[in-house]
Image (cartoon, helix red, strand yellow):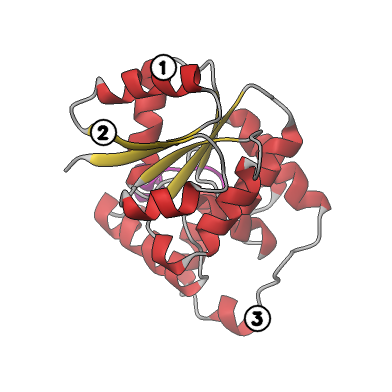
Amino acid sequence: MTVRVVLVDDQALIRAGFKAIVDSADDLDVVAEVDDGLGALDVIRDARADVVLMDIRMPGRDGIETTRLIAADEDLAGVRVIVLTTFELDEYVVAAMSAGASGFLDKGVDPDVLLDAIRVVAAGDALLTPRATRALLSSIDTAPAATPLDEQTIETLTVREREVVGLVGQGLSNEEIAERLYLSPLTAKTHVSRAMTKLHARDRAQLVVLAFRTGLTQLDDV
């Protein structure tokens, strides 16, 4: 199955470079390009995108707000966003992930890393580099929850699901969780999926945030 990719960046040269990289992979295909955030949602919807490569600083509407609108649109529930920027500032990392992005990469990333990143988020996983994780966890540790979970929601998790969410918060993959808890990878994946549904997490990145918000993962665990 081919992953459908939409490029959102105001620089034509940047889009051309990313398109050449993405289209070099047999399982990935750039299906549309947009040069600003204002028209992005309609294009993403019409193109039936799976993954969006999103610039942060654009005229009209920036990438953070555009990502937030994508995450809030029920018709785009399956769309994953990777934010790409030349500005390596922690506030951009936190803003992008808080807005609903599934990943954050520097525009100078190696082509193979970019292609793997698209595949990772298309599969529903989060792409959290060490830098992005540190920035995200730091913000979680100091900021109040924007939408705190009530105790009844947390109590819907089984004991095993709480264990799994705690390990997701530590950055473990499904395979690593399976090994840690002596489960099959498929069972670990099932527990992660059920926890995401119960906690209304859009993707694994949000599940990481919720793991800390609920106390199922502590900063000392990472």
Which label's residue is closer to the chain start, 1 or 2?
Answer: 1
Q: Is residue 53 left or right of residue 154?
A: left
- Residue drawn at 25 percent across, 20 percent down: 24
Q: Which residue is mark 1?
A: 17
Amino acid identity at mark 2:
Asp
| Camera-side mark, 2 or 3 | 2
| Camera-side mark, 1 or 3 | 1
Element assignment for label 2:
strand
Which quadrant of the figure has residue 150? bottom right
Amino acid identity at mark 3:
Glu
Q: Residues within 10 Å of mark 3 (few under 14, many from 20)?
A: few
Cα separation between marks 1 and 2: 14 Å
Is any atom of residue 5 visible in this view? yes
Element assignment for label 1:
helix
Which quadrant of the figure has residue 45? bottom left
Element assignment for label 3:
helix
Please give the range of residues in magenta: 170-180
**Image location of residue 171, percent across then percent down:** 52, 42
Picture quarter with the N terminus: top left
Which label's residue is closer to the chain start, 2 or 3?
Answer: 2
Q: Is residue 92 left or right of residue 124?
A: right
Cα separation between marks 2 and 3: 43 Å
Q: Which residue is mark 2?
A: 29
Q: Residues within 10 Å of mark 2 (few under 14, many from 20)?
A: some
Which quadrant of the figure has residue 10? top right
- Residue drawn at 60 percent across, 30 percent down: 130
Q: Is residue 132 above or below residue 205?
A: above
Q: Is residue 123 left or right of residue 215?
A: left
